[in-house]
Image: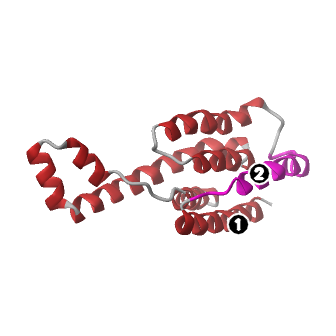
Amino acid sequence: MAQAFYFIVLLELLTVAWVDIRSHRISNAWALANICLTPVLYFAATSLYPLSWEALIFPIGFIVFGFLLYLLKIMGAGDSKFLASLFLLVPLEYQLPLFEKLIISTAITGALLLGYRSFVNRSSLRAYVLTGQWAGVRQVLRSRFSYAPVIVLAWVLWGLNLWK
């Protein structure tokens, strides 16, 4: 059951990532689908999904902190809602390891994008720094990117450890 669950969610994540890359949006329909699937999993696999308030810590955290990140224009609203609904599907014992992989994949992706933007825009960036135009520096380095592929990377990294 765990392998089937993993690959079904991987298929969903790949689809969401593809749509997110093309449209820069994650539809609320994906979050709603995950929320509707959650009770089915809790009744079908009671050994994996014990009824516990602890299972809601990460989903609620993604809604609260995701909203703050949305207000700061760091993360899209759809990203945080989708992450919250995804963590509803993940059994409690796997939530922390998946969260750790999400942090790692976010850091790797962020560092690579920052390095890429710095390299491609190095002459503009140098000019902004030398003239003290910090708004220009922010503009060069800061841009939105699709977050769903980062979630896919975290899921794959987590899955590699799942079957060791």
Structure colour scheme = secondary structure
Q: Please report the residue visible at 60 percent of the width from the left and 41 percent of the height from the top.
A: 96
Nearer the observer: mark 1 or 2; the answer is 2
Q: Secondary structure at mark 1?
A: helix
Residue that sits furthest to the right in the current view? 43
Q: Please report the residue visible at 56 percent of the width from the left and 56 percent of the height from the top.
A: 151
Check residue 22 in the rendering and tell me which mark sits there, or answer none.
none
Would residue 42 be found to the left or right of residue 122 on screen? right
**Front one among 31 and 124:** 124
Q: Label 2: which residue?
A: 32
Q: Which residues are magenta?
A: 25-48
- The quarter of the rendered structure image containing the C terminus is bottom right
Q: Secondary structure at mark 2?
A: helix
Would residue 52 be found to the left or right of residue 85 on screen? right
Horizontal and vertical percent position of residue 129: 14, 47
**Front one among 146 and 8:** 146
Name the amino acid, label 2.
Answer: Leu
Mark 2 closeness class: few <14, some 14–19, many ≥20 residues within 10 Å: some
**Front one among 10 and 36:** 36
Horizontal and vertical percent position of residue 95: 65, 43
Q: Please report the residue visible at 70 percent of the width from the left and 47 percent of the height from the top.
A: 85
Horizontal and vertical percent position of residue 156: 57, 62
- How far apart marks 1 and 2 lie (CA) works out to 19 Å
Q: Label 1: which residue?
A: 7
> Main structural element of the magenta stretch: helix, strand or loop?
helix
Q: Quick one: label 1 or label 2, which is nearer the N terminus?
A: 1
Q: Mark 2 and mark 1 in contact (Cβ < 8 Å)?
A: no
